[in-house]
Structure formats: structure tokens, C-alpha cells
């Protein structure tokens, strides 16, 4: 059994979204979408293996910087994760985020997000564990209603 004080080094989130894989792909890879549900972060990514994956605040400060590992639109995106918004988090090892989009019958898709390789980034693991649910809830709300979850 896991207690509230234990942090998981592999975090898995799954949700169903009434959207096509292409719509979800656009929402996770285009800055005009990410800024509406990812705490204001604008994504700047080269969506190819070895490309840069960068999130910035509205004023341009670095939040996250890493490398794209795999890009298979509109099904799968794998990238590293290094939190740069806090010096303690920036000193930790990079981790990995995998987005998998599976189209379902009936006009919706299943999105699975796995944040793993967190063994060398325990402070990051603790920080993102609550953040991912807010991000993913915001993504779902935006795609299904056209409105951000938080105004």
C-alpha cells in the first residue's frame, strides 16, 4: 500500500476525451492550446527525435527543457522533462513523459500519460504528481467545451 507521503517514480494517468487523436495531438503540441490548460506555458518543440522540447512562461522564462525521444503523430509523443522553474528541481536528473493517444469507437479517444524515470528526480516527482491531474483535466475541458477549465 502507498501512503500519502510516498512518491511514485512512475506516474500513469488515463482519461477519455471526446475528441479525435488529431485534435488531442494539436492540443498537446501547439502553443496556442498549451497556454490555455498547462498553467500558461507555451510549448516550443521540434517534434522529431533529438528535437528540443521547451515550455516557457508568458514572459519567456524557461519552465521545462528536454529532448524529444519519439514523435509519431497523432499517436505518440515521448520527451524528456527537466523542471527549470525551481533551482532544486533543475539540479535533479531528467525524467520522461510519454503521451499515447488511442482512438476509440464512438467519437472519443483514450489519452494515457506516463511520467517515469523519476528515480533521480524525487522532488520533481512530488511536484508534478498533483499538477498532471490539473493539466489533463484542463486539456479535456478545453477540447470538449472550447473553454479553459480555469479562466
Image: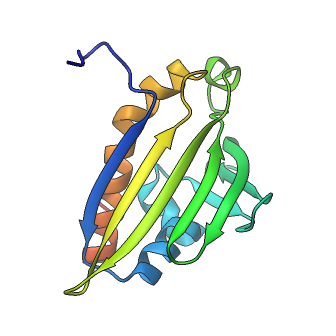
> Residue at position x 50%, y 73% from top?
75
* Picture layout, residue 20 above or below residue 67: below
> Residue at position x 32%, y 80% from top?
19
- Where residue 76 appears, as percent x and y from the top left, is 53, 67
- Where residue 60 appears, as percent x and y from the top left, is 71, 50
Q: Residue furthest bottom?
A: 106
> Residue at position x 53%, y 26% from top?
124
* Picture layout, residue 90 above or below residue 115: above
* Picture layout, residue 11 above or below residue 124: below
In this view, the residue in front, 85 or 14, is 14
In this view, the residue in front, 145 or 92, is 92
- Where residue 113 appears, as percent x and y from the top left, is 42, 53
Classify the position of the C terminus by image quarter.
bottom left
The reply to whether residue 77 is visible in this rendering is yes
Dividing the picture into quadrants, the one containing residue 111 is bottom left
Q: Is residue 4 left or right of residue 119?
A: left
In this view, the residue in front, 20 or 41, is 20
Classify the position of the N terminus by image quarter.
top left
Q: How is the image coloured?
A: rainbow
* Picture layout, residue 94 above or below residue 55: above
- Where residue 10 appears, as percent x and y from the top left, is 43, 34
The reply to whether residue 150 is visible in this rendering is no
> Residue at position x 43%, y 24% from top?
126
Amino acid at each position: 500500500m502507498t501512503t500519502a507521503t510516498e512518491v511514485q517514480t512512475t506516474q500513469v494517468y488515463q482519461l477519455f476525451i471526446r475528441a479525435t487523436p488529431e485534435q488531442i495531438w494539436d492540443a498537446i503540441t501547439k502553443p496556442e492550446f498549451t497556454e490555455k490548460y498547462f498553467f500558461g506555458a507555451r510549448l516550443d518543440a521540434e517534434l522529431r527525435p533529438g528535437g528540443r522540447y521547451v515550455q516557457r512562461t508568458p514572459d519567456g522564462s524557461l519552465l521545462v527543457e528536454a529532448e524529444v525521444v519519439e514523435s509519431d503523430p497523432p499517436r505518440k509523443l515521448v520527451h524528456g522533462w527537466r523542471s527549470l522553474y525551481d533551482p532544486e528541481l533543475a539540479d535533479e536528473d531528467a525524467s520522461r513523459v510519454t503521451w499515447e493517444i488511442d482512438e476509440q469507437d464512438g467519437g472519443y479517444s483514450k489519452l494515457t500519460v506516463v511520467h517515469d524515470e523519476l528515480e533521480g528526480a524525487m522532488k520533481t516527482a512530488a511536484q508534478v504528481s498533483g499538477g498532471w491531474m490539473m493539466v489533463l483535466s484542463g486539456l479535456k475541458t478545453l477540447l470538449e467545451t472550447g473553454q479553459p477549465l480555469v479562466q
